[in-house]
Amino acid sequence: MTGLGEVLAGFRAATGWDAAVWLPAGDGDLPRVLDATRPVVPPPGASLPRAGSPPSAIEVDGGTCLVAGVPGPRGGWVVVGPTAEADRAAPHLAYLVPAVGSYLQATLEVEHAATELAERYEEINLLYAISEILGRTVSLEEGATTILRELSETVGAGIASILVLEPERDELQVVAAIGVDVGTLRPIAREDDCSVAAKVFDTLHPVIVPEAAEPCASDAPYRRGELLCVPIVWSGPRGASERLGVVNLSARPSGFTAGDLKLAAAIATQIGTAIQNSRLVRASIEQQRLRREMQLASELQLKLLPPASVLAPDARAAARVVPAESVGGDFYYLVRLGEGRVGVMVGDVSGHGYQAALIMALTMSAAAIHARSASDPGEMLRALRDSVRDELETTEMYVTAFYAVIDCGARRIRYANAGHPHAFVVRPSGDLARLAAIDPPVGMAEELHTAEYPWDPDHDMLVVFTDGISDVENRTGARLGEQAVLDAVRAEAVSAPQCVVDRVFSLVGAFADGVAPRDDLTFVAVRN
């Protein structure tokens, strides 16, 4: 018996009358019975009342039914009878209608939620798959076709293409296509006023072009029916945006939605990062890792780091990364996990230079995927390790990583610490509790575990930093040391996170006295 059936059975037990719920059927069809203590259907041509109208008496086999319309987005009717006492049933029917309306509304919301969850699940799977693809290649050409196939299958597009700007020719050239012969696709001039792709590239505004719009000659090979076109853009850490290309989707029988546009734009952002990685790799090979390529990689790294404001309003945070002269492997990641929980991750890739930067970028991408799908910190680090295992083995590198989930409601902090020495919970008194390393670094450990520690959301603060902070040297070669850093933290134990970060970096700057750091400097502070 369903929940609705129990309501109807209770009504019958209390009043002695049978009851049923009808839902609309197709045009010209009789309503269908959703649930009933005694199934009954109206005779053909019966006039059923609207929601809010007085109940109607309808003659059926066995007597008279009293029928009332149910209000709400999922309409229907509540039926009492057959009975010879229809007039006496009216007051009771008035109590039953709202209960049935609430039930129908709840079932509609559940169906909508299930549909939304299914759509989000497909999108998460797609983003995860593309992250895996990009994590296994530094060449856009190698992964572009696979990315397009995954995207077109999820969206339901029969034709898909990626076009990237060729600066020397000032035209958009095809790097991958699905559902059409690549040999038939000609480049599109950037100044082609007729081309939708050229306009989207120039304006950076994604569009859905209806099927009725006649395509121009340059767009025709890329399109059949409705066309969805989004720009591929890479944004630098200082806000400057670089146009890279466009993604075209077409040949979807039911047409595209705003959700499809949003998903395609998200994928285009990942493709933009892949294009930048590809360009950096080629530049490094061609120019023997000159300073310019290192600087570009450093800017890409900084762009991957989220702003501290992403944790608001669940938590207040401050974070700063100061790269050394060469590209390094320090990073942090902040994420809201829902229900007042926030995730905080700090990591340090072994070594320096371009390889460390690539491992850092791959690790950041994997962390963005797994932090939302794995509620347990140890499980998240295991999933992250599996995503970058091949790259770590190939480069013989490892990653020290600390990942914590601060649960304000449960008043606890759950964390996994893979070889990261500098993670502390700071109390208002200045007392410090070290959240020590539980396991070896990622890439050296097969098992990664989770521990927990009490958390006072009204007073406690989490601080995590990399060894570049404590290893800063001055002009005499003396080392700053962890104790001096912790003393600076204690002095700001009740302050806002930004005050803590500012004080630590002021200490570092004064101590180094102009000596450039040998390693990246990263410091993160979080409190509720």
Image (spheres, helix red, strand yellow):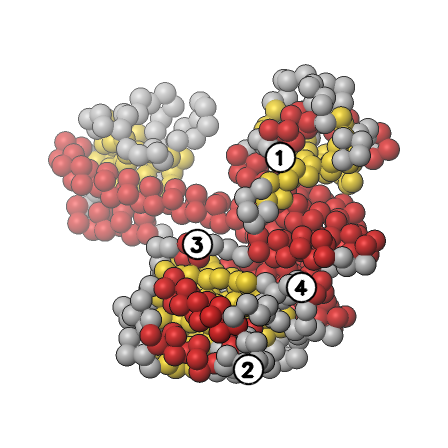
User: In the rendered image, which residue does mark 4 sit on?
Assistant: 326
Q: Which residue is pictured at 19% across the width and 37% down the height? A: 93
* Sequence order check, earlier mark of 2 and 4: 4
412 lies left or right of 483: left
Q: Which residue is pictured at 22% across the width and 25% down the height? A: 53
Which of the numbered marks, if any, corresponds to residue 310?
3
Amino acid type shown at disc 4: Ser
* Sequence order check, earlier mark of 3 and 4: 3
Which of the numbered marks, if any, corresponds to residue 478?
2
Q: Are marks 3 and 1 in contact (CB under 8 Å)?
A: no
83 lies left or right of 173: left
SS under mark 4? loop
Q: Are marks 4 and 1 in contact (CB under 8 Å)?
A: no
Relative height, residue 67 to residue 500 (above, below):
above
Frontmost of labels 3 and 1 is 3
* Sequence order check, earlier mark of 4 and 1: 1
Amino acid type shown at disc 3: Val
Frontmost of labels 3 and 4 is 4
Which of the numbered marks, if any, corresponds to residue 34?
none
Q: Residues within 10 Å of mark 3 (few under 14, many from 20)?
A: some
Frontmost of labels 4 and 1 is 4
The answer for how far apart the CA atoms under marks 2 and 1 are is 53 Å
SS under mark 2? loop
Percent x, y of residue 497:
37, 64
The answer for how far apart the CA atoms under marks 2 and 4 are is 22 Å
Which of the numbered marks, if any, corresponds to residue 230?
1
The answer for how far apart the CA atoms under marks 3 and 4 are is 28 Å
Amino acid type shown at disc 2: Ala
Considering the image in quadrants, where does the C terminus appear? bottom left
